[in-house]
Amino acid sequence: MQIANFKLQIAKGKIFPVAYCLLPVAFLFSGCGTAFQVGSEIQAGRSALKRGQPKAALASFQRAAELDPDYYLNFSLFNQGVWTYVGRAQYAAGNHAEARKALERARSRYDWDHMAKLYLGLVLARDGDRERGLKEIEAGLRGVGDWLENIHYRIYDGKFWDSGGNIRDEIESSLATIRGRDMDLKQLITSAEWVGREMEDEIERVVRERMRERSDDDKSQDKS
């Protein structure tokens, strides 16, 4: 995602900095009623997906999509549309046809949704559409890598994202695999899936690191 798009989202009120202190609190600032329900369903789905329960995750994501089909994750700098989450849950459940529909929809909604590109590519590659699958995987990986580089140097909280550089290293390795003469598709899929999981986990890691820094700052002020 380009920095200009990120600034535009801030202007529209789509980013809530308080989320860097505590994710659940973010829901209180996302409005009440429908907005609260959607945010709660997304978080429940994310938790289920991480636990390896794609069917439970899918149910939550589908409820969120029914409530607000234009929703995208708004308590993190790294945005993803609700249809990306629906597609990812379908992919994890092995429902590739349904995953493709959801991810195509996500892909057409928001050009900055790099996870939609990445997982659409994974679905296509697994279903035999190698050429387009590789194109989408590459677009998704490049998008995530560029996004990490941009926020790392231009936004203060960017320093918390992929602080060790492991995700970007894996992305570079995957891109090199795509460019290679004897490309191992199975290896590429495994690598791309790892990037997807790590970026999702990074959302909570960033929150923890931000809270740790604030705690350290508070302790330093108390001593002075």
Image (cartoon, rainbow, N blue to C red):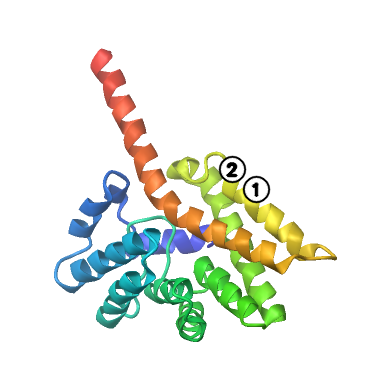
Q: Is residue 131 left or right of residue 2?
A: right
The secondary structure type at the circle numbered 2 is loop
Question: Whole-Å distance between the Cαs marked 1 and 2?
Answer: 6 Å
Question: Do tag 1 and tag 2 residues touch (Cβ < 8 Å)?
Answer: yes
Q: Residues within 10 Å of mark 2 (few under 14, many from 20)?
A: few
Amino acid type assigned to the residue bearing label 1 in the image = Asp
Does 2 appear above or below 102?
above
> Where on the picture, by quarter, is residue 89?
bottom left
The secondary structure type at the circle numbered 1 is helix
Mark 1 = which residue? 169
Front-lying residue, 27 or 1: 27
- Badge number at residue 161: none
Q: x, y percentage for residue 220?
A: 31, 19
Q: Is residue 183 left or right of residue 122?
A: right
Q: x, y percentage for residue 194?
A: 55, 57
Quadrant for the C terminus, please.
top left
Q: Residues within 10 Å of mark 1 (few under 14, many from 20)?
A: few
Q: Is residue 21 left or right of residue 103?
A: left
Q: x, y percentage for residue 196?
A: 52, 60
Q: Would residue 14 be visible to someone looking at this image?
A: no
Mark 2 = which residue? 165
Which residue reaches farthest right? 181
Amino acid type assigned to the residue bearing label 2 in the image = Gly
Which residue reaches farthest left? 33
Which residue occupies 55% across, 76% down? 120
Which residue occupies 28% across, 82% down? 66
